[in-house]
Amino acid sequence: MELDIYDFDKTIVPFDSGSLFACYCLLHYPWIILCLPVIFIAALLAVLRIINFTGFKKICFIFVALIPLEKAVNGFWNKHEKQVHKWFLNRKHKCVVISASPDFLLEEIAKRLSFDFLICTRHNRKTGVIIGDNCRGEEKVRLFNQKFPNARVIDVYSDSLKHDKPIFSLAQGQCFHVVKSEPVPFEFAKQFSERK
């Protein structure tokens, strides 16, 4: 099977969907402000390296326990679906979208945009807590290889050269660095040898 891989946040859309969704929920369900002290403490512990980033993410979506999640997700995408980059809608191959963003948030837009496959961070929909590991860095490759052991990756698209080097390394066609919402082709070997 031939596939293209796409990151989601700041690649297919020009924003970080998890952060923007949290802001959307704070605006529409203001009582979730009760969760902010716990989230702030977790953020501080992450900055101080007392807990890792996954530890922080286990906390930062606890507010979903206090909102009508399906309604909130639909409202969010009704507002922001139009910001999806048009170039993504003209795909040549089957696509796998791989993202650290929550499954409860991306599954709706995956349906609307007809993603062929979606791999993302799994969360408990009642508590907001991560199930397993955060889908980031090398974990993206591990999950991809687990799901598609015999796939041939053609092109890879991401906004982050730093965090998505592992998925860029899978490309047998072209790598595209999404800069200012536009995919810019680059040579993987040359790009990463220059960054050493």
Image (cartoon, rainbow, N blue to C red):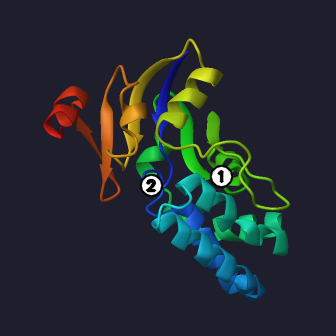
**Residue found at the far left of this picture:** 194
Q: What label sits on residue 106 in the rendered view?
A: 1
User: Which of the pair 194/154 is nearer the observer?
Assistant: 194
Q: CA separation, marks 1 and 2?
A: 16 Å
Q: Are marks 1 and 2 in contact (CB under 8 Å)?
A: no
Type of amino acid at the residue the image marks with label 1: Leu
- Asked if residue 115 shows in the view, the reply is no
* Residue located at (49% from left, 55% from top): 9
- The quarter of the picture where residue 39 lies is bottom right
Against 156, residue 49 (above or below) is below
Q: Secondary structure at mark 1?
A: helix
- Dot 2 surroundings within 10 Å: few (below 14), some, or many (20 or more)? some
- Most foreground residue, 110 or 64: 64
Residue 69 screen position, x and y as percent: 80, 66
Residue 176: x %, y % from top left: 32, 39
| Residue at 65% over, 64% down | 77
Label 1 or label 2, whichever comes before in sequence order: 2
Horizontal side of 62 relative to 83 (left or right) equals: right
Residue with the mark numbered 2: 85
Q: Give the number of marks.
A: 2
Q: Nearer the viewer, residue 168 or 118?
A: 168
Examine the rendered structure and indicate whether residue 10 appears above or below residue 89.
below
Q: Quadrant of the N terminus?
A: top right
Q: Is residue 16 left or right of residue 163?
A: right
Which of the pair 113/14 is nearer the observer?
Answer: 14
Name the quadrant of the C terminus: top left
Disc 2 element: loop
Packing grade of label 1 (10 A; few <14, some 14-19, many >=20) is many
Name which residue type carries label 2: His
Question: Is residue 107 depicted above or below 16 in this figure?
Answer: above
Query: Does residue 132 appear left or right of residue 47 in this picture?
Result: right
